[in-house]
Amino acid sequence: MEQLTLNAHSRKTRGKEAARKLRRQNQMPAVFYGPHSDPVELAVDVHELEKVLRQTSSENIFLDLRMESDGNWDTRTVILKDLQLHPVKHVYYHADFYEIPMDKEVSFQIPIHCVNTPVGVSKGGILEQIVRELTVTCLPSKLVDRLDLDVSGLDVGDSLHIRDIQMPEGIRTAMNGDQTVALVAVPVVKAEKAEGEEEEAKEGEEASPEPAAE
């Protein structure tokens, strides 16, 4: 789990005009909150946030958020809960920082990546990934960036399920173990051909004359 540092400053002004003024100064409105903390309205330097984001490729971004208020600094461990983009300008618009207790298990979403080429693909099969994220519970310090699922052994018609995923130490999931994560499907052309041949055989049987009665 990567953990980075970001500075923020408390702000007392609210509303659309105050937010527009912040953005003209290359800052962005944000909010800090948590299960045992009062919400704090913040201003974050956009360039500093972009610099921090370039340092990680994880979907779960943890930060040591350093918040300044009246010259005093307070650091909290947070996860970037939400980051909004302007629908037209495609610039960062607003951020939510959620305080994470490091000594308690929390639920997260972890991406699942299928790695290696299934043996069934070389036979014309098609790899289909059904589940792309896994809901897990763990201590924040145990969280991993992603789960790699080796699909090299899958033949045509084979599948892997959630129960087949090797979970890292300290991480568990309550999702249904029978749920299919990935499979190698029969090629559509072959499936259609087989179906067509079956229909032709059936039509041939129906068209065959009945033997004459003796």
Image (cartoon, rainbow, N blue to C red):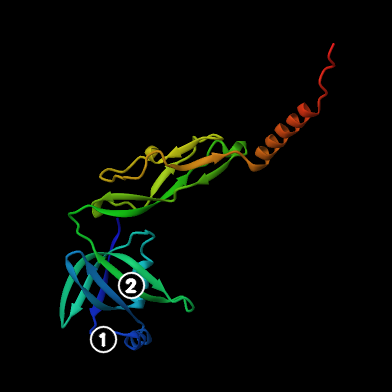
The amino acid type found where label 2 is placed reads Ala
Residue 183: give x, y in percent of width and height: 51, 40
Q: Are marks 1 and 2 in contact (CB under 8 Å)?
A: no
Q: Which residue is mark 1?
A: 13
Indicate the quadrant containing the C terminus: top left, top right, bottom left or bottom right. Answer: top right
Numbered disc total: 2
Q: Quadrant of the N terminus?
A: bottom left
Q: Earlier in the sequence, mark 1 or mark 2?
A: 1
On the image, the x and y values in percent for residue 203 come to: 76, 32
Residue 38 lies left or right of residue 164; in this view the side is left
Q: In this picture, is 177 found above or below 16? A: above
Give SS at disc 2. strand
Q: Residue at x 44, y 51 (%)?
A: 132
Quarter of the rendering containing residue 180: top left
Location of residue 175 (image quadrant):
top left
Q: In this view of the protein, which residue sits in the foreground, 67 or 203?
A: 203
Mark 2 — residue? 95
